[in-house]
Amino acid sequence: MERLEPDDVLRRALDLLDATREDALLVLGEPGIGKSHLLQQIAGNAGPPTTVVRVRAAESSYPLSGIAAFISSLRGLESADLVRHVTLRSQQPDGLHAAAHDLIALLQGMSFPPTGILIDGVDDLDPDSLALMGTIAAHLGGTGLRLVLTATEPAPAEHFEGMPTVAIGPMSEAAQMQVADEHPSTDRTSARIIAQRSGGNPAVLLAHLDELAPGTAQRPTGLKLPPASSTVHERIASAVLDTLDPASLEILRIASLAPLCHAMALGDLLDGSPHVVEDLVEDGLLVRSGQYIRLADPRVRTFLASTGSARDRRAIHARLARATSSYDASLTVWHESFGRDTTGTVDDLLRASAQLVNDGHTDAAVELAERALRRSHSLDDHTDALVVLCTCLFEHRHLALTARYSTRENTPFSTDQPIALASVRLASQILRDGPAVDDEVRTVVRHHGLDGRDRVDVLLCLAVLHRAESWEVETARDLLTVGRDTEPAHRLTRERLSAAGEILDALDGTPEPTEPVLLPLAPAPGLPTDLLLMRGRALALRGHHQQARDMLAVVINGPDPLWASIATYMSIENELDAGEFRMARIATRAWEQRSPWTLEAHPDEPWIRGWCAYSLGAIDEVHGHVEASLARSTRAGNSGLRARAIALRGAVAMLTGDHDQAVRDLRQVTALSTRFRNPTLLRHWADYVEACARTERHQEADVATRLLEQRVTTHPSRWGELAVARCRAISTQDERSLELFTQAIGMFGPDDSAYELGRTQGALSHRQKQLGDPAASCQTRTQAAATFEQCGAESWARRLGGQPETPQDQSPLGAISTEEQEIVQRLVAGQRTRDIAEALHLSVRAVELRLTRLYRLAGVTSRRDLVEVLNQSARRTDWT
C-alpha cells in the first residue's frame, strides 16, 4: 500500500475519475488527516459529474442504510427504481453476494454516463451495506461509475481485499507551516514547536494552534508541552493502545510524562520492565536513542500525559525524580519542577535545557525551556541562566530558538542588557534575516565597546555581513564606521574590520590591490573562525574561487557549528559563481542536513535551490523556487534578491529556447542593475545579449554590450573580461564573429568557469550553423556538451549532447506515424481539417480520427491546445 502526500492522492483520484474504464480506489487515513477535505477537493476538480456521499455512523444499526444512501446519490428516477430492487434473500454471505450482483446488473442496465461517487467513511457503513459495497466496487465494469472510498486505518480489508488502495501520509513541514502562517494566534517559532508535536495531522495541528494564548503572535510566551489533548488525539491513541496489556500501558503512561526517559531509571522504577520496554521498542511504540527512550508518536504521548488526575501525575513525577537522580541531572530537574518545592526551578530548567542541547536532544531541551518560561514571573531575574542557554543554542545553530529565549519581555532594547545576551540575540536575528537591528548594534558597540571586545567585534561583523549579503554596501560601510570610531589598539579587531572592508570593496567592484595579502589556509594560533570566514567570502567575491574554497573548507570542518553552517552557505554561492554545479549541489545537501532552525526563512534558500534545479533541468521546480524567491524579496524589500530571481528565470528561458521571454526578463534585470555598480553581482549580461541576438534585436544587443564594457572598465573582474568577449562575438553578425568566438574561448583557463565556457561554445555552435557550416557546428556543440557535463550542468549537457531527454523534454506525442507527422505540420501551419484531408487525399472523418488520437497522446482536448503544446515543444528543442 502506498502512503502519499494529500496532493498526490488527489491526483491519483482525479486520474481514476477521468479514466476511460470504471474502477474504484480506497483511500485510508488516520482520524483528522483530512479525508473529508480531500473528497471535497476531488469533487471540485473532477471532470465527470461527481457526488459526495456522507456515511452516518449513527445509522450503522439500520440494515442497508448505507446502500440506500449510495443509491440516492445517483439521483432521478433511476435511483427510485433501484431502491425498489434492493432486497436481501438472506444475510448469509451467499445471499449478500447474490443481492450485490443483482444490483450490479441493474446499474449496468441504467447506462449511466461517466459518474464519480465519493463515499466518505465507508468503514462506518452497516455490515450488510459494507459487504454489498465491497462486491460492487470490484465489479464496476459497464456501470459508468467510478468510486472513491475513504476509511479510517486500518482498512476494512475483509470486504475490499485486492482493491487499489492508497493512504494519506502526514503533512510535510512546509505544509504545516503554511497552515500555521494563516492562523492568527501564533508566531512562526511557536508554530514550528507545535507542528513538531502534531505528527503531520492537520486536525491535531489546528487543535494545538487554537489552544495558544491570544498574545502569542505579538510576544512569544511559554508553551504547554506536551500540548492539551483533544478528541482527535483520543481516536488516534485508541487505535494504538486498545490492544495493549496493562503492563505496557503503564510503561507508556509513565514515559509520556517526560520528553525523554532514562532507560536505567525506568528499569529501577518498574521491576521486570526491561523486556516489556524492548517489546514496545520492537513494536514501534517506543524509540530508543542511546540510553534514553521516548514515545514514538507525539499524539499518543499527548493523550497519555493528560490521563489520570493531576495528583496521580505529580506522584509519578516524584517517583521518576528519585529514580532518575542517579543517572541524569537534567531530567531530574524536569520531574522536580512538578513538585511543591520549586525553589530555583526556573534557573535549573534553563541550565538543564542547555545541557540537553549540548547532548543533541533539542526537542527535549525546548520542553524544559518552555516550562521555565511558564514558571517565570520575569526573565530579567534569570539573565545568567538565559545567557548559558542562548549561547548554547546559538553555537548549535538553533537561531530561531536563540531569538525566542533571548528576547526580553520589555521589548525595547536597553543598554543595561548584559553584553552576552544582547550579542547573542542580535546575532540570531541578523543570521535569520530578521528585522533591521542596525541601531541596536550601534548601541551595543558604543556602550559595550570596551567590555567583551570579542563579542562586540563578532556582532558588528555579523551585522556588516548581513547587509553585505543583501548588497546594501553603503549601510554596511556606515556600520563599519561605528566600529572604527570605537576601535582600540587590538590586532584582531583591526583585522576583522579590514576583512569586512574587503568584502564591501569586492561587492562594490573596487579594483583589487596588485598584491593582495591572503591569510594562510591553515588557521594560525589564536586566529578566530569568523575572520577566516570573512576572508574566504572576500576571495569568493573577487573570483578567486579555488582559494575561497580552501579557506571556507577550513571553517566548514572546524569546531564551531554555527560558523560552519554560514560557511557552507557561502561555499554554495562560491561554487555557483565558479560554475561548478555538481559541487554546489553537494554543498546544498550538506546545508540541508544542518539544523532546520538555521535555514528557516533564509532569503537565499529558494534562489539557491532554484539554481540547483536549473542545473538538473527540473524546469517546473525552478519556477516554483523563483516565485518563492520573489515573494521573499518583496516581503524583505530586497531588490538584489528580486533581480537575482528574475535573472534565474531568464536563464531558464534561455535553456528552454523561449528567447522572447528571456529578453523580457533580462531587460528587467538590466534596469534593476542600475542600483548595483559591480556587473559581477548580476551575471545576466551575456544571456541578455544572446537573447537579443536570437530574436533579431541586434541594436539592443549592441547597446547591452557597450554598457557591459563600460561597467567592466570601471569595475574590472575576470568574469567581466570573459563576459565582454562573449558578448562582442555574439553581437557581431557576420563571419568576423567566428574569430571573436575563437578568441573568447581561448581566453578561458583551468580556473575559469566551465559553465561560462560551455555557454560560449554553445553560442559559437549556433553561429556556425547560421553561417552554413553544420559540420563545425556539430563538433563545437559536442565540445560544449562535454564542458557542461564536466561542471555538472546536466540540463545543458542533455540539451546539446543529443542524450535521451528527460520526460519533460520529450515530444508530447512520442512516436507517431509519417502520415500523422504530416497532419501535425499542417495543423501547426494553420490549415483547416478539410484542407488537410484534401492535401493528403483522406476523408475528413479519417483526419478527425487521427486528430483524436493526437489529442489523447498530448493530453489535450482541443485543436488550439494541441497547437500550443506542439509550439512549446518546438521552442524547447529548437537550436537551429
Image: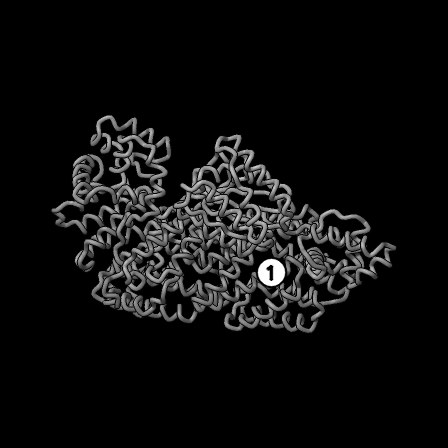
Q: Is residue 645 above or below residue 165?
A: below
Q: Which residue is mark 1?
A: 651
Q: Is residue 30 left or right of residue 838?
A: left
Q: Is residue 421 left or right of residue 643?
A: left
Q: Residue 858: horizontal and vertical position, in percent?
A: 69, 52
Locate residue 719: give its quadrant: bottom right
Secondary structure beneath dot 1 equals helix
Q: Residue 693: horizontal and vertical position, in percent?
A: 69, 67
Q: Is residue 704 above or below residue 394?
A: below
Q: Residue 202: horizontal and vertical position, in percent?
A: 40, 51
Disc 1 residue crowd, few under 14, some 14–19, many 20+, Cα 10 Å: many
* Residue visible at 35% across and 62% down in the picture: 184
Q: Amino acid at mark 1?
A: Ala
* Residue visible at 78% across and 62% down in the picture: 829
Locate residue 770: give its quadrant: bottom right
* Residue visible at 83% across and 61% down in the picture: 835
Residue 494 appears in view:
no
Q: Is residue 467 left or right of residue 25?
A: left
From the viewer's side, name the closer residue of 676 and 311: 311
* Residue visible at 51% across and 42% down in the picture: 26
Residue 239 appears in view:
yes
From the viewer's side, name the closer residue of 141 and 350: 141
Q: Is residue 301 above or below residue 624?
A: above
Q: Is residue 415 above or below residue 528?
A: below
**Which part of the image, by quadrant, shows the C terminus?**
bottom right
From the viewer's side, name the closer residue of 47 and 4: 47
Q: Residue 29: horizontal and vertical position, in percent?
A: 44, 44
